[in-house]
Amino acid sequence: MSVAAISTDIVPDAPLAFTGNNGVFRRLVTRGALLELITFGFYRFWLTTDIRRHLWSHTEIDGDALEYIGRAKELLFGFLIAISVLGPLFLAYFVLGLEFERYKAFASLPLYLLLLAFGRFAAYRARRYRLTRTIWRGVRFWMTGSGWSYAARSVLWWPVLVPSLGFAYPWQSAALERYKLRHTLYGSLPGRFEATGWQLFKRVWWVWLLGLLPWLLLFGGFVAEFSTTGGGGQRPPPSGDAGSGMVAGYAIVLGCLGLVALPFLHAVRRAKEWAWWTAGIRFGNIAVACRLRPGGLIGTYWKLTGLGLLVFLGYAAAAAGLTAVLHSPAPVGGAFEMLLHGRLPVWGFAAYLAMYLVLGIVLGVLARIYALHRVWQRVVAACAVINIACAADVAAAGDVVSAFGEGLADGLDFGL
């Protein structure tokens, strides 16, 4: 069954619905962020579990909600076990990296690749854990496959991805999704992924190109500016270089203006990618139809960007005001210079630290509300399941796995 057939010829028979309340989730993540601060970050295991339970329990397929049975203690123990592995690894990585660089530049590059592969391994194992804690109609999802095999496939795509400036991303995504879905099961029902990289490329190539354009303009403008001034900051007498300098200036201005459009382009790309990904999912004869439109996410990402900018401006104004109170006129270097020379009082240092922590809390809450909850809400509302009757006779299968992969992902700073 093709993606095109799903989107046009077949009428979905089981709509998805999200019944969660925005205010409830906002209070959940705000309270959780404050408790993270009080517990020096350890509450994040409980907050992560609460967020997943909220999202899962309010996502209904054919009238029945998903169930998340993971526990915060599992995440905590998995993290502690993972840290016992990551600690010696990071130490060895640091020492060997310094030693290798003494003999030859970039000699530590293989170590960076190893760390990248380790991160992809952790992401695969974390997904495996989440699936075994996800239940629908009494049957759990589960996953087989090798985390190291997935990591190797992911790393091997980078020699193609980087030189292509990211244009190989659709084929990388399709290949990795095929591996993940091929080893994903709902009870006794095996999954697979039928969407192709070419289908995604046709949807997003122009979005990706427009997203690269501001960076290319900025890079080209600065290179041209540097070559015109000779790197010394002084222009030569008026000549043919004056025209080059003007072009470089226009390129830099256009590049800066183009950066404003990046949240809009990101929303368009994510909407198209979500629709592509969901339409490629299969479990036996069960398929998913998704009619998510870019407009469904543009407002969400613009709200996140605008509110984040307001928070940064408020932080900058508060920091400037505090600096003015502490020392007027402020020395060259500001608060950092005062701290370096021992002229920053303890209460001033505490005030700066408190403002920084508040900034982190507010930005974290905004990211969870808009980049997670609101996006989840809109994606679910745009999807429906086809041939849901095929899930009626699925037998339970699969065993739960440990949270070690979640711990590794958390230690490597991966997302939800």
Image: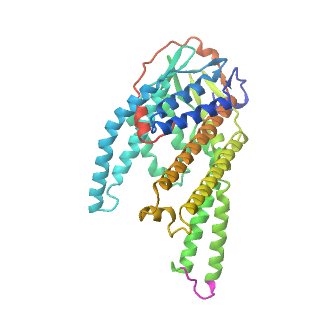
**Within the image, what quadrant is residue 222 found in?**
bottom right
Residue 332, position in %: x, y?
Answer: 51, 70
Is residue 144 visible to us here?
no
Decide whether the magenta segment is chiefly helix, strand or loop: loop
Task: Based on the picture, tell me whether residue 237 belongs to the magenta stretch.
Answer: yes
Q: Which residue is drawn at 57% across and 79% down?
A: 228
- Examine the structure image and report whether residue 169 is included in the region drawn in magenta: no
156 w.r.t. 286: above or below = below
Q: Quadrant of the N terminus?
A: top right
Percent x, y for residue 214? 62, 60
Quarter-wise, where is residue 369 in the image?
A: top right
Q: Residue at position x 63%, y 50% from top?
A: 311
Q: Residue sitting at 65 percent across and 29 percent down?
A: 24
Report the span colored magenta: 233-240
Q: In this view, does 148 lie to the left or right of 212?
A: left
So how many labels did they put on this image? Answer: 0
Please tell me which residue is depicted at 46% across the width and 15% down the height of the picture: 397
Q: Position of residue 251 (x, y in %)?
A: 64, 68
Q: Position of residue 157 (x, y in %)?
A: 46, 46
